[in-house]
Amino acid sequence: MTFTPNRFADRAIAVLLALVLLCAASPSQQQSDYVFHAESDLVLVNVTVRDKSGKFVPGLKPEDFTILEDNKPQKIVSFDVENVDAVPALDVAQAKPLPEAASGQASGAASTADVAAEFKDRRLIVLFFDLSAMEPDEIARAVTSAEHYVDTQMAPADLVSIVSLGSSLLVNQDFTTDHALLKKQLDTFSSGSGQGFEEGTTGTTEGTPDTGQPFTADDMEYNIFNTDRRLEALRSVAEKLAHVQQKKSLIYFSSGMDRTGIENQSELRAAVNAAVRSNLAIYTMDMRGLQALVVGGEAQSASLRGVSAYSGQATLNALNSNFTTQETLVTLASDTGGRAFLDSNDFSKIFKGVQQDTSTYYLLGYHSTNTARDGRYRRIVVKSNLPGAKMDYRRGYYAPADFRHSTNDDKERQLEEELASELPATDLPLYLGVAYFRLEGNKFFVPISLVVPGSQIPFVRSSDRDKATLDVIGMVLDSEHHPLNRIRDTVKLAVSTSTEVQKKNVQYDAGMSLLSGKYHLKFVVRENQTGRMGSFETDIEVPELKAQPLNMSSVVLASQIQPVKVKTSANLNPLVRDGSEIIPNVTHVFSATQHLLLYYEVYDPARPPVADSARGADSRRDSENKPGIRLLSNVAFFQGKAKAYESSLLELTELNARERKAAVFQLDVPLTSLKPGFYTCQVNVIDDAGGHFLFPRLALLIRQESPSAAR
């Protein structure tokens, strides 16, 4: 189905819209989840009061505190003192089920008061093991440190739960004080639990280990989605613990969180906000410990190619890579009231820190006088009449938002505010993919694809059709945060039956022209039945290709080509060729019955010098068709280091997109040649005349699917 878009001004060119029902299910469709709905306008604030010497001040009462929300005084309706140090050792240690919102087994029988009473004067700790990213030795260190805590540091007041993320998010052990139960579960995290992947480089061998092998596995694209999965998992845990009033602490065992490429920054802020609203502090631990970044590489690594080891660039790259993996861990900890424990082999410090931060505190509750459900940030200020007192508390929260009672103007304003808001909306799953193709000079066409799972779109029956509408708004900011391009559109869906759509994805495609440089993209999509919104933010860099010996565009993976109904000679989208448009596959998930299409371009390939005797004849030729151009390309698929399949070589001896000085490659690979599973797809490009080469790599998943389900 194709929809005619609205035109937008500024520097954006004509937007190409295609609504595509994709057969590949999104990651959120592959995992079932419990749904628990509850509403409460009680705002809880944990307050730690210390005197000038840093000691906790006991014996305070409600009248000793004043709470302001947006500078307006609030009435304290609940007051409690949590003193976990006063809890004696229990004679009977038993497992305590997670509260109904946390365990996912919502029965509606337990009240908030019952949950609060059960966990009063308890230190609630969640041990979160990220098995999807840690290597076996890192998992072993995490388990050892947790076992040491259980054996020697666990206090009588500590209620501990164990959660893990592998192929799915699991509650391995409910809150309990039973040491034996905890250690039994920790023992199950064997070295075989790790599902980590090492990232490789793309497009160059400079500064990489010379192992003598033709290929190094690169799971960069997989890790992009894997990072989002980890943030979604943290957000899910926070939301399901929201109905426990006491302060909670989550210890996140990982080996860093690398956020390179196209990642959703909105998901990071959503995870932080969910933790803040749920009164959950995240303590992050890098299980790689103290790392020695040796010049030239460690002893077990092969020597580096090129001159990077001598110029210092290899060491700088290693430092930058290590910093990138730890940056998100620091953000998660600092923004939620926790702490990050990095570059240390003493893993017991994090448990001591959690116990110190949650020993004694006051729990204040109030009903906000601001009843507007506008989704705006509300600042909290807590004051005490105790002279010289120092107080720690959360500084604010985001109010809930209401959609049904909004006017059309209000709904439009909500979109605009969400686009400008620092608080991301992630109620509607949203995925984004971008690429770049050179038009001329340093001007590029950037296709943008937005994907929403069809299962998340509610349809209403009207006449003989199921209908739904999606609002799309987006903008592009330059490196100085000045707005450049803007998109605003409403997509109308009308299908004979929505059952088919529920099993697929809905994709919105657009495009714009940008110059070389760094940009920030933000898009918001809203379904207009319930008003749920999803946002996606990312930073992109359109490269300056002249700096590279061999210049190449992005590699677009696809499995569908559709006719273009509106043909125009001014169409600048390279994905539209000969009256057809290539639809990018954002999720990189394919069916075994499909064909994999790869589209990419090579710019300004080298030509050998022309002999003097031939210059007269050659001068009459088109300069773009000089003899000697020879580009070779194919694609290979790897599982680990084993090559599973390699296509035949395709040779180009002249530019087939001369107006853009580009050599266009479009490969078609039948996936029936590959078994279902995860693959690393390596595109091989060789400039035979110039002696240059590139090997960009992407990850993809091939699923077993019946022919009737193919797209």
Image: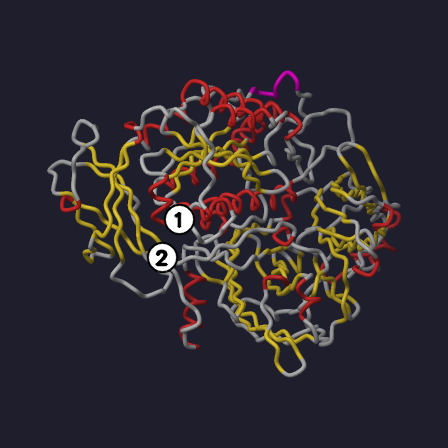
Magenta stretch, overall SS: loop
Residue 243's mark? 1
Residue drawn at x 60%, y 28% as measured from the top left: 189
| Dot 2 and dot 1 residues touching (CB under 8 Å) | yes
- Identify which amino acid the numbered label 2 is placed on: Ser
- Find the distance from the CA under tag 2 to the CA under tag 1: 9 Å
Q: From this view, report whether residue 303 is shown above or below residue 424.
A: above
Residue 185 placement (x, y as % from top left): 56, 28
Along the horizontal axis of the image, is 578 left or right of 473? right
Residue 649 placement (x, y as % from top left): 87, 45
Dot 1: few (<14), some (14–19), or many (≥20) neighbours within 10 Å? many
Residue 40's mark? 2
How is colour applied across the structure in the image? secondary structure
Secondary structure under badge 1? loop
Q: Quadrant of the N terminus?
A: bottom right
Along the horizontal axis of the image, is 345 left or right of 210? left
Q: From this view, report whether residue 312 is shown above or below residue 31.
A: above
Residue 577 placement (x, y as % from top left): 77, 66
Q: From this view, report whether residue 287 is shown above or below residue 665.
A: above
Residue range corresponding to the magenta coloring: 294-300
Q: Quadrant of residue 184?
A: top right
